[in-house]
Image (cartoon, rainbow, N blue to C red):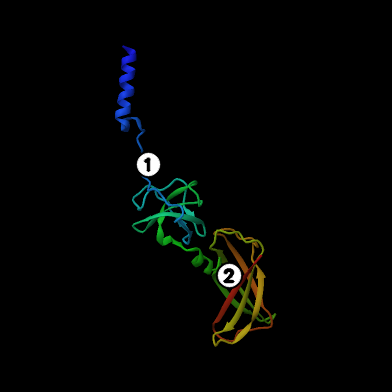
Amino acid sequence: MKKLILILMIGSCGVFTFSCSPEKTSKETKVDFEKQYETRIVTEAVNVRAGPGANYEKDEGGPLIRGEKVYVLEEKDGWIRFRVTPKDVGWSGWIKKDYTVTPEQYAAEPPLKIEDWKWKNESTLGWIIITGYVKNQSYETFPYARIIITAKDENGNWLGNGDAYLDPETIGPGGTSNFHVSIPDAQCTTDSLSITYKFDLE
């Protein structure tokens, strides 16, 4: 009797093959990894969602930060599903596409940016003193970062150049550093002063 039941079960399984396969629970779209593309985060902190919408639960892995590189697997309704590696491994989730740019667009943006600054004439020394702070907008760390400033008066007259290392010199992702730049042998005689700047990132 036991042998007969065993034969019937095998026969049943042979006929109704769908009943022998495990049920698939994943609803993720099959991804063509040859068509995935790289993008960069350009917002300070981007929440990761479980699906393509703000109504989906936040991912416990925390937000992505500005400058972080992700790989887009698919797009839906203004949202993108990403992984943090170019292969089918690693953290995955959904973020708004508006918070990303292409690598080319990201490279065109300076990683360091002056957030605030002020100036004064130092009459005793006959110098212009420019102080302020810089923010790191990227996902990189820059040791020994140096700022180079050119100053002009409100009429566009060149006043001089000055440079200084940031304080602290090393500035990490999302971090800030102060600067104190002196323009020697210069005094601004107009009410306002403009600057242009660049960074020497060693």
The image quadrant of residue 22 is top left
On the image, the x and y values in percent for residue 58 come to 40, 48
Q: Is mark 1 on a helix, strand or loop?
A: loop
Crowding near pointer 1: few (<14 within 10 Å), some, many (20+)?
few
Give the left or right position of residue 17, taking residue 158 as reference: left
**Residue with the mark numbered 2:** 132
Pick whichever, 117 or 70, lies toward us.
Answer: 70
Pick whichever, 154 or 51, lies toward us.
Answer: 51
Give the left or right position of residue 85, taking residue 129 as reference: left
**Rendered position, 70 above or below 151:** above
Which numbered marker is on residue 26? 1
Q: Is mark 2 on a helix, strand or loop?
A: strand
The image quadrant of residue 10 is top left
Q: Say which of marks 1 and 2 sits in front.
A: 1
Give the left or right position of residue 183, taking residue 24 as reference: right
Q: CA–CA distance between discs 1 and 2?
A: 52 Å
Q: In which quarter of the image is the N terminus?
A: top left
On the image, the x and y values in percent for residue 28 come to 38, 46
* Mark 1 / mark 2, whichever is N-terminal: 1
Q: Quadrant of the C terminus?
A: bottom right
Pick whichever, 148 or 140, lies toward us.
Answer: 140
Residue type (three-letter) at the residue carrying disc 2: Gly
**Rendered position, 22 above or below 107:** above
Query: Tag count in the figure?
Result: 2
Crowding near pointer 2: few (<14 within 10 Å), some, many (20+)?
some
Residue type (three-letter) at the residue carrying disc 1: Ser
Residue in the picture at 46% in, 61% down: 43
Residue in the picture at 50% in, 59% down: 66
